[in-house]
Amino acid sequence: MVKNIAILGASGYTGAELVRLIATHPDMQIVGLSGERKAGMTMAEVFPHLAHLDLPVLQKIEEMDFSNVDLAFCALPHATSQEVIAALPGDLKVVDLSADFRLRDPAAYEKWYGKPHTQPELQKIAVYGLTEFYRDQIREARLVAGTGCNAATGQYALRPLIAAGAIDLDDIIIDLKAGVSGAGRSLKENLLHAELSGGTMPYSAGGKHRHLGEFDQEFSAIAGRPVEVMFTPHLMPFNRGILATVYVQGDAKQVHETLAKAYKDEPFLHVLPFGQVASTRSIGGSNFVHIGVVGDRRPGRTIVFAALDNLCKGSSGQAMQNANLMLGLDETTGLMFAPVFP
Amino acid sequence: MVKNIAILGASGYTGAELVRLIATHPDMQIVGLSGERKAGMTMAEVFPHLAHLDLPVLQKIEEMDFSNVDLAFCALPHATSQEVIAALPGDLKVVDLSADFRLRDPAAYEKWYGKPHTQPELQKIAVYGLTEFYRDQIREARLVAGTGCNAATGQYALRPLIAAGAIDLDDIIIDLKAGVSGAGRSLKENLLHAELSGGTMPYSAGGKHRHLGEFDQEFSAIAGRPVEVMFTPHLMPFNRGILATVYVQGDAKQVHETLAKAYKDEPFLHVLPFGQVASTRSIGGSNFVHIGVVGDRRPGRTIVFAALDNLCKGSSGQAMQNANLMLGLDETTGLMFAPVFP
Amino acid sequence: MVKNIAILGASGYTGAELVRLIATHPDMQIVGLSGERKAGMTMAEVFPHLAHLDLPVLQKIEEMDFSNVDLAFCALPHATSQEVIAALPGDLKVVDLSADFRLRDPAAYEKWYGKPHTQPELQKIAVYGLTEFYRDQIREARLVAGTGCNAATGQYALRPLIAAGAIDLDDIIIDLKAGVSGAGRSLKENLLHAELSGGTMPYSAGGKHRHLGEFDQEFSAIAGRPVEVMFTPHLMPFNRGILATVYVQGDAKQVHETLAKAYKDEPFLHVLPFGQVASTRSIGGSNFVHIGVVGDRRPGRTIVFAALDNLCKGSSGQAMQNANLMLGLDETTGLMFAPVFP
Amino acid sequence: MVKNIAILGASGYTGAELVRLIATHPDMQIVGLSGERKAGMTMAEVFPHLAHLDLPVLQKIEEMDFSNVDLAFCALPHATSQEVIAALPGDLKVVDLSADFRLRDPAAYEKWYGKPHTQPELQKIAVYGLTEFYRDQIREARLVAGTGCNAATGQYALRPLIAAGAIDLDDIIIDLKAGVSGAGRSLKENLLHAELSGGTMPYSAGGKHRHLGEFDQEFSAIAGRPVEVMFTPHLMPFNRGILATVYVQGDAKQVHETLAKAYKDEPFLHVLPFGQVASTRSIGGSNFVHIGVVGDRRPGRTIVFAALDNLCKGSSGQAMQNANLMLGLDETTGLMFAPVFP
């Protein structure tokens, strides 16, 4: 039976990506779309690339009827998201794409997001949405928190290595190259084409990026001790895609084997042959992750490359994968399409 | 029943795009892939973005077994294509993506492609593959000739207008902006990133582009008299997408109505509301065409904008649409996925 | 003797370009920089690429001392510009880069810019800044109005042809491809990298672009009768450069000869050999204009291509060229540097 | 007195950049240009952006007259370069932009470049061309070896830190983002716009990049013991610019002070205020280097960012700076022009 889906905050990039994914999903249909400032507009007006679809007009959230909704995707800004979700019917399944429920510790939330969480009870029940590692809990969850797109990329490179004790926990560096759509449709000077294209620069360098909260939480939990990585994101002159270049101390062959073994049955995680590197161009527009491992000339030093599409596997595709689980569907439903190249 | 498909010339961009399309096509499976210079390689080696698929290894054409093949896509260079198709089993359905069978007149072929056609008998039976206008013939065809990608874009803007007598036939200008993937994966200096990105320039200006052969053939046939358009393509610093800006003399409202009426039941041809313009970003990665009509400040002068994805609707998507028809499938099967934006 | 220069509105792209040009100008030095919202900041903060220069801190205009200023460049938005210039010392030489003094007719200004001009007396004395055609008047002017960047490009292609009667005045089409920096450093959704890169679309199509006011004024004055061109600009995914593709009815060889003869002594206007096309990549970062002429296959139809850098020759370079004349310097001083490629 | 300059290998990107620089150099003029495959062509044909210059026609090297040449730039491929330079007049000053004379140790050359050096005597007299560190020797040199562009970027970030003992020598990681023009005008599939734009990937990862030979040589010499850095270059979808993100263990403030002090009198090396990051957009088209230092949240860990233009400061600008010294001119002559932005 086709599931009825609502998307809250459909006028941003992750909202549009959810619509794109549902358009070819055999078991889902969209019954409601919200967009505060754009309420009353059609999606064709907000996103002309969706003009061929027959979609509900954008509404304000308070006008939406959730009585027949099976699951809601919430693609609102953080801080707003927690308020909106708290006001939804208590039994409605929700996949939240904001940062509001990624961190389990209220103190950590306040540290990284600058104000106290207003819904600590919801925070407690939320499941961290990195599908491959929280699958069983996601299946039973009422509220799943989509991960940060950078946080997902780094974790795919590192989680099995930390779990297996294959690397030095005190010397992990994630140098990340992030496509600009990760910053959303926001009007900021540094996101203008004239400023951004034709070059690159780092941002939030030196332990300041909020996704460090997720790295700290997850890696420390796996290791059973505090783990603090270095993390330097760079803004890239392309729209989709993240490449994480991860420097670790550990045997390269063992690193490769650990990752290959951990992911061998994963439909979306593809570990490349030893020595091959990953490219963002090879996963663009898809839900796949490419992971490559290369040994340095100095034994014991290894570079892991992980590439994914920030809007798909890094947010809306991940959200869909989780929604499939929450609705009792096969996890891969509607997500096995190939990347777009060139 | 699932149809068995072979792709000849699978190591180029249109070949890769066919594989992408078939990967989610419910009624097709790939049973053979050819690539002359890359025979023996896997598609994952040639195109890492297809690494998640279980595909046949690339073979030489002469090694392929066509006995169980229902339809072959031929994505080879022109001149080569006619030789290869002539050597295929006589009852094999073929969709050719090269330029070899687009022109019905051997003299026209020789004029635009610089040497005589070697398979005039095949040329006679080939059907021109602009689906929306040759649907019935394509359904019955053994050999369908995919159109030029630029030629398709211009024709979507103009065919109904010429047929309806809505515009002056002697003053048609097509100023076209073409993404670079239309030039294929060929090693030419002007296709290098360092040469091409960050700017634009025209090419084949002044009535020299080969797709003029198609415009001449088709427009003259519709009009019942010779029609010669001006056509100036410009190489664009992006990978996918063609925008045709078409200048015509005719009433703007009537032009819009003529196009809207002609395409109102077409699943892939979307005429925008009067006064709206088309963008290549709104159709990227999809089989849709966006068409916009704007009137100039001087009555009687009108601009028609048509945008499509050159690799999808302009070649491999069109080929798939035609293959669906030839195999008795619904024309839209496997092609209704949404564009990728941003 | 070195001339003292002030730049009003130095925090935008044309302001930064003026600073770049003056940095290597042997006869100019910057004594004042204004920036309303950014007053108090250094240029290194606003434009890190100028960090190596020793420059005045940004001030508010009302705090500037004009007593020792020889010439002021005014790079403010239109409407603001006319108010600011009216309040400057009456004998101060001014090159205005806004649209405020481009149109001589107050009614035309109101038509294209939506409100009445408040300084009609200044409007009367302003000289149109297309250097090659207004050189003598510019030399004597107190106030020179920089042209629109698109308007400059189209005029370089057309003025000599109209003057010589070499083309049909009723059938001129300017299809223009414009780099995004022409839209300035403004926070608009369509100027975001994620929206704009990777594709193209037209804007202000159908006789709505304000630079038509300049085309109408100038071409009609040359022709001695009303001339109305069609003009369709397209937003391009690159930062600098404009390519005008101009369709005219006239003999191609005669068109080429007319342009070559008209510009043969011009230091910045380069007419390419007959049949060669212009590329924006060949003039980027410079004050040069490349002009190419190609004949269509149908005799009597001709395409003229003109390419220039919108921020340099299209605005700040032109302004510098005019300032040189107004200050009694050689017109080319500080402007003969080569384009940057690749 | 104006110096007479020859450029050998003028048809590549570094050759074109040299012509651009000399075009506004007050004390140099070009008297000879060589280009083997393009001999007989004009530079305007090979590089239309140089069409405004009056330049010698390209010749074969053996046809060139070096009798009146004061200095030759040699912009040929490595291996070819050593043969050509050996055949030049013995007293001709030469700045070589190839890799042939960067490594002083013949064994190191053979290791990284795969064959023995054929001119070990020349190799002995060549001076490494990192101007700021070899100034005195360059002034007296007959043959100066231009550095690798990546090698220069990494060295600007690290040399003073190694010299001062401010960082751990065994844990240095250079994650480098390199614009595509560094690969030259060569016809390789991975350099095509369709392959490269819109994403990123690493190359020569794992201690395989040849510029490691320079890092090893230089850093070990400074340290007085072997130093082996990790170095991972990434191919970037832009034309000019290199950003090195360098991870070191050392106190961030001390790192910043060490660099600021070392470079405080350097005209081209600009150390940003503590905590600021560097951007390739801020140095594009110029001879400047921007260096930023950011401390990690974990004390003792520091990130140094260095940005330069690979074609200018990374090769042809450096070559010009060295040529100025060799010819007794002020080092900065013709090189103080500002970056081009946006």
Image (cartoon, coloured by chain):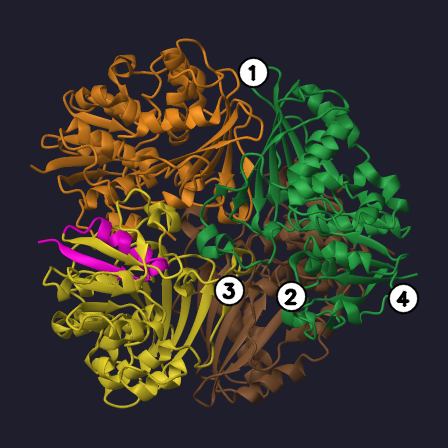
Chain colours: A brown, B green, C orange, D yellow
Q: Looking at the picture, does residue A80 appear above or below residue B273?
A: below
Where's residue B113, x and y in %? 65, 45
Q: Is residue D5 magenta?
A: yes
Q: Is residue C319 magenta?
A: no
Q: Is residue B118 left or right of residue C116?
A: right
- Mark 4 and mark 2 lie on one chain; the one further toward the N terminus is 2
The residue sitting at 31% across, 69% down in the picture is D153
Q: Are marks 3 and 2 on the same chain?
A: no
Q: Which mark is residue B68?
A: 4
Q: Is residue A198 visible?
A: yes
Please name the residue that numbered disc 2 is placed on: B49
Q: Amino acid at mark 2?
A: His
Label 1: chain letter: B
Please name the residue that numbered disc 1 is placed on: B298
Q: Amino acid at mark 1?
A: Arg
Q: CA distance from mark 3 to mark 4?
A: 38 Å
Q: Amino acid at mark 4?
A: Asn
Q: Is residue D269 visible?
A: no
Where's residue D149, x and y in %? 33, 68
Q: Are marks 2 and 1 on the same chain?
A: yes
Q: Which residues are magenta?
A: D1-26
Q: CA distance from mark 3 to mark 2?
A: 19 Å
Q: How many neighbours does mark 4 have within 10 angstroms: few (below 14), some (14-19), or many (20 or more)? A: few
Q: Could you say whether the residue bearing mark 2 is in a helix, strand or loop? A: helix
Q: Amino acid at mark 3?
A: Lys
Please name the residue that numbered disc 3 is placed on: D188
Q: Check whether the beta carbons of the residues at disc 4 and disc 2 lie within 8 A of each other.
A: no
Label 2: chain letter: B
